[in-house]
């Protein structure tokens, strides 16, 4: 079997199988919950369904779907859990539903969120791939996105976006309004240098990959929980 060369992003299905994109080998590596290699999805041989530069990944176990951002092709490839290509979302461009180097993906309820990196925004789609709304625009002030990286959603449905340039996490509602932000550039607690990733657990603990400081920082959101 092939070896991973440049692993990028990770997703986990309902059975705790682990899916890892590898941008250089052009494939997705699948491991069981104990880390044992299971199979490889996709190959860099040309033709639809073989990734050129896979980065972001999300798995919808209920619908038996895998979504993979193929950054170099400016598309989101949709596959079943065995790796058969079912379709694609998007093309190169700046319009709604179009991409300029899509990277991170995140599934949350009825939405698939895509970091559309060089269009300086995050786009939301329904699970059939229809455009819903976009958040962010180019700029160097808070509320704009300059180097959007990781994304996550809290229990209230608000969207957290890591911006590597600002060294901060910005929090938006679904209407695209900036609610607040936290973090600044630096090396102290609560500060970041080139933050790159983000995860929020079911208890609203916020994990931020602070890449250049070589650490993960953990924050707690204390908002009002939506009733179960």
Image (tube, rainbow, N blue to C red):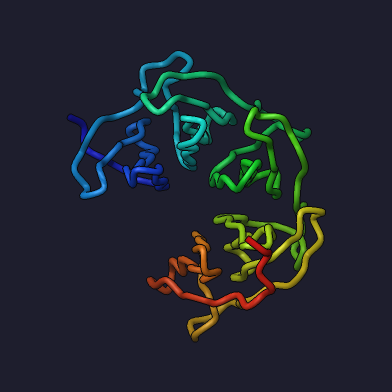
Determine the image quadrant of residue 158.
bottom right
Identify whether 111 is placed above or below 88.
Answer: below
Q: Nearer the viewer, residue 9 or 38?
A: 38
Determine the image quadrant of residue 49.
top left
Q: Nearer the viewer, residue 29 or 119?
A: 29
State the residue at coordinates (65%, 37%): 100
Determine the image quadrant of residue 160.
bottom right
State the residue at coordinates (17%, 29%): 1
Identify whether 171 is placed above or below 220.
Answer: above
In the image as oriented, which residue stretches furthest toward the front? 228
In the image as oriented, which residue stretches furthest toward the bottom? 188
Image position, residue 85 (x, y; %)? 47, 19
Where is the C terminus found, in terms of image quarters? bottom right
State the residue at coordinates (56%, 47%): 106
State the residue at coordinates (59%, 70%): 167
Image position, residue 24 (x, y; %)? 35, 36
Q: Nearer the viewer, residue 135 or 126?
A: 126
Image position, residue 60 (x, y; %)? 50, 37
Count the marks: how many? 0
Identify whether 87 is placed above or below 194.
Answer: above
Image position, residue 172 (x, y; %)? 73, 61
């Amino acid at each position: 079997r092939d070896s991973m060369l440049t692993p990028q992003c990770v997703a986990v299905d309902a059975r705790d199988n682990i899916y890892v994109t590898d941008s250089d080998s052009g494939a997705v590596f699948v491991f069981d919950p104990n880390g044992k290699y299971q199979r490889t999805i996709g190959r860099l041989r040309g033709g639809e369904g073989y990734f050129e530069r896979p980065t972001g990944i999300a798995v919808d176990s209920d619908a038996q779907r895998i979504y993979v951002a193929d950054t170099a092709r400016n598309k989101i490839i949709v596959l079943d859990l065995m790796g058969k290509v079912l379709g694609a979302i998007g093309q190169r461009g700046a319009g709604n539903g179009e991409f300029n180097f899509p990277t991170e993906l995140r599934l949350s309820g009825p939405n698939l969120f895509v970091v559309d990196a060089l269009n300086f925004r995050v786009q939301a789609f329904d699970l059939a791939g229809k455009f819903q709304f976009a958040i962010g625009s180019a700029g160097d002030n808070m509320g704009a996105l300059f180097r959007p990286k990781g994304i996550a959603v809290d229990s209230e449905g608000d969207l957290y976006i890591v911006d590597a340039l600002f060294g901060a996490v910005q929090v938006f509602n679904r209407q695209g309004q900036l609610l607040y932000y936290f973090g600044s550039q630096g090396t102290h607690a609560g500060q970041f240098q080139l933050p790159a990733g983000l995860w929020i657990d079911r208890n609203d603990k916020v994990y931020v990959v602070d890449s250049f400081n070589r650490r993960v920082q953990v924050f707690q959101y204390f908002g009002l929980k939506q009733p179960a």
